[in-house]
Image (cartoon, rainbow, N blue to C red):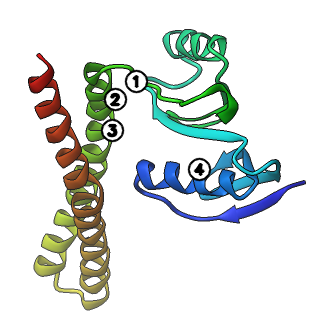
């Protein structure tokens, strides 16, 4: 059994950078599940990691075909979690980029943006009615519980907005400008 690290990442770009920093130290990711990374010791810098959000679950025939194609290029699928896929390739094989053009980067960015937008909207949709209920209900214990839950959900929505969605939208804007320059 390898080293287990429990860590929460909300931004896949930062998570990917951290995995590559761990690989540079000689720790290779072997499995991921919710906030739980399993590493094994290896030669420092042996692997380069990438994380991708698939359009559909990995078990979907379309996603499965894509993953088989990726494996055919020498990329190893380390782990999958929901629609996220953790990939690695030996650094000795050269650079490892999943997307060769701006259009494919934008397509992936749109999937990530849609996920972040959905999470934010769910939090706001759950929080707002609870705040309204807390104002309209007259029983103190129910009202205060609704207020707490509502404010917590709204706070999470704000976190999704400020820490995930807005930075993702800025990345998408840069990519769109880059695409315009290349065309």
Residue drawn at point x = 69 percent, y = 31 percent: 92
Closer to viewer: mark 2 or mark 4: 4
Regarding mark 1 in the picture, which secondary structure is present there? loop
Circle 4 residue: 20
Residue drawn at point x = 66 percent, y = 47 percent: 32
Circle 1 residue: 99
| Residues under numbered marks 2 and 4 in contact, where contact means CB atoms less than 8 Å apart | no
Circle 3 residue: 112
Mark 3 crowd level (few <14, some 14–19, many ≥20, 10 Å Cα) = many
| Residues under numbered marks 2 and 3 in contact, where contact means CB atoms less than 8 Å apart | yes
Q: Is residue 78 visible?
A: no
Regarding mark 4 in the picture, which secondary structure is present there? helix
Mark 2 crowd level (few <14, some 14–19, many ≥20, 10 Å Cα) = some
Closer to viewer: mark 4 or mark 3: 4
Per the rendering, the mark at residue 108 is 2
Residue drawn at point x = 25 percent, y = 47 percent: 168
Q: Nearer the viewer, residue 113 or 90?
A: 90
């Amino acid at each position: 059994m390898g080293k287990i690290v429990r860590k929460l990442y909300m931004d896949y770009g930062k998570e990917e950078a951290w995995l590559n920093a761990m690989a540079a130290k000689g720790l290779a990711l072997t499995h991921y599940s919710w906030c739980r990374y399993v590493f094994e010791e290896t030669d420092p810098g042996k692997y380069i990691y990438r994380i991708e959000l698939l359009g559909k679950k990995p078990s979907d025939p379309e996603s499965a075909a894509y993953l088989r194609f990726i494996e055919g290029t020498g990329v190893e699928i380390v782990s999958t979690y929901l629609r996220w896929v953790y990939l690695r390739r030996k650094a000795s094989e050269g650079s490892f980029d999943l997307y060769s053009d701006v259009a494919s980067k934008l397509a992936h960015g749109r999937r990530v943006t849609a996920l972040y937008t959905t999470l934010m909207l769910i939090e706001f949709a759950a929080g707002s009615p609870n705040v309204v209920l807390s104002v309209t209900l007259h029983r103190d214990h129910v009202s205060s519980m609704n207020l707490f839950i509502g404010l917590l959900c709204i706070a999470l929505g704000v976190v999704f907005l400020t820490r995930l969605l807005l930075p993702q939208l800025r990345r998408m804007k840069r990519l769109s400008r880059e695409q315009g320059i290349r065309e």
